[in-house]
Amino acid sequence: MTLTEDLSSDMQSLGVSNEALGYDLKAGDALLFSPFLLAHRCLLPAPGQKRYTVCFTLIPS
């Protein structure tokens, strides 16, 4: 498996924007997004910092 740092050309071919967004989140804030619509870096928490996540799946009934 090859690790690619710059995915710009792949994102462009898929029609996904590579515009970087940042949010000034505070403790207790939540950010919900669809990973199918937003490319994200999945960065690990900084050493000594906690980061909690909630994972859920919506299934049509």
Image (cartoon, rainbow, N blue to C red):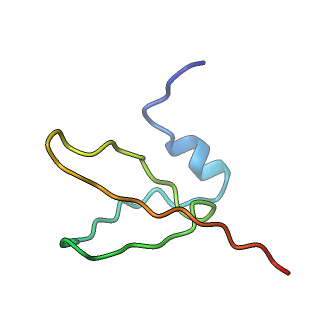
Question: Which residue in the rendered view is the most extreme toward the right?
Answer: 61
- The one nearer the camera, 56 or 40, is 56
| Residue 5, image x, y percentages | 43, 32
In front of the other: 46 or 52: 52
* Residue furthest top in the image: 1
Residue drawn at 25 percent across, 75 percent down? 28
Along the horizontal axis of the image, is 52 left or right of 40?
A: left
For the C terminus, the image quarter is bottom right
Q: Could you tell me which residue is drawn at 23 percent across and 72 percent down? A: 25
Q: Is residue 33 above or below residue 46?
A: below
- Identify the image quadrant of residue 56: bottom right
Q: In this view, does 40 lie to the left or right of 11?
A: left
Q: In this view, does 4 lie above or below 39?
A: above
The residue located at (63%, 61%) in the rendering is 36
Image coordinates of residue 49 in percent, x first then y, are 17, 49
The residue at the far bottom in this view is: 61
Number of marks in the rendered image: 0
- Look at the picture and state if 46 lies above or below 19: above
Where is residue 35 drawn, in percent x and y?
57, 60
Q: In which quarter of the image is residue 1?
A: top right
